[in-house]
Structures are given as structure tokens and as C-alpha cells.
Image (spheres, rainbow, N blue to C red):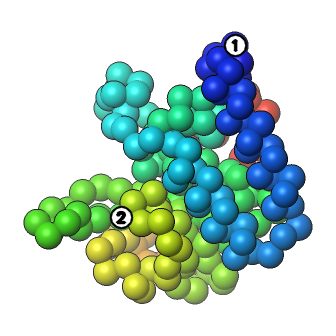
Amino acid sequence: MQRLYGRSGLAILEEWFTLIDRLQGGDLDTQLREVNDFFNRRVRWLEDTQIWGTEDYWATPLETMGKRQGDCEDYSIAKYVTLKELGVPGSKLRMIYVRARIGRSQINQAHMVLGYYETPSAVPQVLDNLVPSITPASQRTDLDPVFSFNSEGLWAGGSSQSRADPVARLSRWRSVIERMQQQGFLS
């Protein structure tokens, strides 16, 4: 981290390790809230073209922390990986690709959030970089789910049944998993 991102990169990585140590074995609501806050407060939202010079790049948590910049996919991936590091089962976490209605104009924009599902058919709790509080998806009338995925499955809309292998179907997910593995993360 220091070689790639300097002292700032090393500092945020140390903060992340401290967060994981402090939350390990803690109650789930605290883990969700503090992980959501950690990234929302430390990572500045920018478009991929500004950060990476490409249209759509899914960054690993280390890349996001190192740059201290990311877009919605980067926030969601970093929160997903961090919660898995804390022992939250990956089966209860999904990145949710949504159409978000932004502001009063009701413009629909592609967006990604992280969902925590108590059970496969439960209404997920939504962790979002646009809205600081964690709320049930049923209260997020500004979001229309398109599909969701994690390392184990790919779901269409609000379905509780996985339809495909996400690594096979989502090349950007496959790419970020490969880079995370090179960086020492498990998928």
C-alpha cells in the first residue's frame, strides 16, 4: 500500500485493520453501520473516468482505499469484503444493481448498493454511499432492483432463487475477484 499509494494509503489500511479488530465478534447491526460509515466517510465519490481513465472499472478494496476515491460499485465491493472479513456469511450479502431515481427530476441512473439479507427471501437492509443510514429496501422507493449477486449466485430483480454463476456471467466481478485474490483476499 505504501509503495502504491504512499503514507495516506498505508494510514487508511491501518484504520481498516483497526476497524476489523474492533468489530470482530461484535453485534451485526454495529458491524453493518460502522462498515457503511467507514467507507462513506473516507472515500470520495468520483466517476471511473476521473479515477481510472476508463468507463467502468470495479476496484478492489485496497485500490479504493489507496485512492480514497470510488464509485458506487467500489463502495459496495469494499463493504462486502469487509463484512465477510468480519465473519458475516457471504450468502447474506449481495451487491444489488439498481435503477436509482436521483433528486426531484426523477432521472433514472444505474447505481449499486450492498444488501444484507437475514434470509434469502428477506427484505434486504441497504448499505448505500448516497444515503448514510441503513434502511430496509422496502423504504427505499427511489431504488428499483435490476439484479443482485455475490460470490455464490446471481439473482434477477427481487427473486430469491439464483439464476446463474456470477463469476461466469459478470466479467467485471470475475476481474475484481482475481485481483483481490492476488492481493491476498479470498472471494
Query: Residue 98 got which mark?
Result: 2
In the image, 152: left or right of 126?
Answer: right
Neighbour tally class for label 1: few under 14, some 14-19, many 20 plus, Cα within 10 Å: few
Q: Position of residue 88 (x, y in %)?
A: 76, 66
Work out whether 110 lies above or below 136: above
Can residue 106 be seen here? The reply is yes
Q: Say left or right for 121 vs 169.
A: right
Say which element carries label 1: helix
Residue that label 1 marks: 3
Amino acid type indicated by mark 2: Val
Q: Residue furthest left?
A: 105
Q: Nearer the viewer, mark 1 or mark 2?
A: 1
Three-letter code for the amino acid on which mark 1 is drawn? Arg
Residue 165: image location, x then y, percent: 58, 56
Residue 179 at x, y percent in the picture: 64, 30
> As rendered, which of 176 and 32 lies closer to the eye?
32
Q: What is the spatial separation of the Cα atoms under label 1 and label 2, in whole angstroms?
A: 36 Å
